[in-house]
Image (cartoon, rainbow, N blue to C red):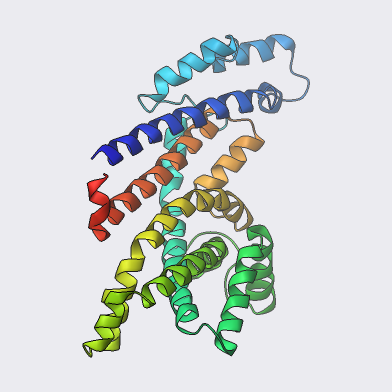
Amino acid sequence: MQRIASRIFDALFSVWALLTLVFFVTRMLGDPTVLLLPLGASPEEAEALRIHLGLNHSLGLQYWNLLRTAVHGDFGQSFLFARPALQVVLERLPATLELAALALALGTVLGVSTGFLLALHPRGWLHRVLSGVVLVGQATPVFWLSLVLILVASVWLHLLPSSGIGGWKHVLLPALSLGCFFTAQIARISESRVREELVRQHVRMGWAKGLPAHVVYLRYVLWNAAAPIVTMIGLLAGEMAGGSVIVETIFAWPGVGRVIYQAIENQDYPVVSAGIVVVSVLVIAINLCADLVCLWLDPRTRRTA
């Protein structure tokens, strides 16, 4: 339990550090009243709006007020939507969870399968082809892949919609874009771990006992290789959260990433703060779940937990 308690403390510290960083960075972007007021507004109107938004106080007081209210889930009123900022973000959360869940599932299944095949066939044309695909997946920027998928699947072939939310066809392209790098990374760690397990003594004993191939591969190889793969999934969750901002913006996917991007453009400080905290909590929760799964998969780690 010591390991879990340490992770929870680190998580709280990370959320505070991110919230602090976001506060001071957003204040460097400029005065939001310039965007909110019409052209030709008087200085008196601008000052009245600053007072209404609470921007007339010193930075220290604004920061303290944010910390004091954020503990209770109150990040203030959105400048653009005139509603609680957390409510604006949480309304977009289901769309982000839908996209992230599909990208995570595709990345895990395809990544583990590809890594397993690479480990079983260390030489030959299959290994060369799969290694090339994985290398391209690692090196391809998510924004470039998104544009290529739109061009090919939507513009040229008219197979899938290029934007918006709806049925499974709408989520497929953004999920593929978001899960590409994730798949490549999982494939690499899976190949490495499966290769290590294939030469271990317990696997050789399984073959010597005449056990079926699926039993040896699933119980003796993949099960023992699962803990590092799960750990990598948790580590990549943060990168996936960053990539979701780009993917949701390109595909006009109404998720948290897109609303954060729009809030940054319009200097909507409360929504930016609420969005960053919500995404951070999601990433931390995924990492914590990954730790718990690792404790279950590998009993040896419980001694140091």
Q: Nearer the viewer, residue 261 or 17?
A: 17
Q: Nearer the viewer, residue 174 or 121?
A: 121
Relative to 298, 102 lies left or right: right
Horizontal and vertical percent position of residue 78? 52, 29
Q: What residue sits 30% from the left and 78% below the top?
A: 203
Q: Quadrant of residue 196?
A: bottom left
Q: What residue sits 60% from the left and 23% below the top?
A: 24
Q: Is residue 26 above or below residue 142?
A: above
Q: Is residue 215 visible?
A: no
Q: Quadrant of residue 219?
A: bottom left
Seen from this angle, which residue lies furthest front?
Answer: 201
Q: What residue sits 58% from the left and 13% below the top?
A: 59
Q: Nearer the viewer, residue 196 or 95?
A: 196
Horizontal and vertical percent position of residue 34? 71, 23
Relative to 171, 42 lies left or right: right
Q: Nearer the viewer, residue 105 or 128?
A: 128
Horizontal and vertical percent position of residue 112? 43, 71
Horizontal and vertical percent position of residue 255? 50, 49
| Quadrant location of the N terminus in the rendered image | top left
Relative to 198, 240 lies left or right: right
| Quadrant location of the C terminus in the rendered image | top left
Q: Is residue 106 above or below residue 288?
A: below
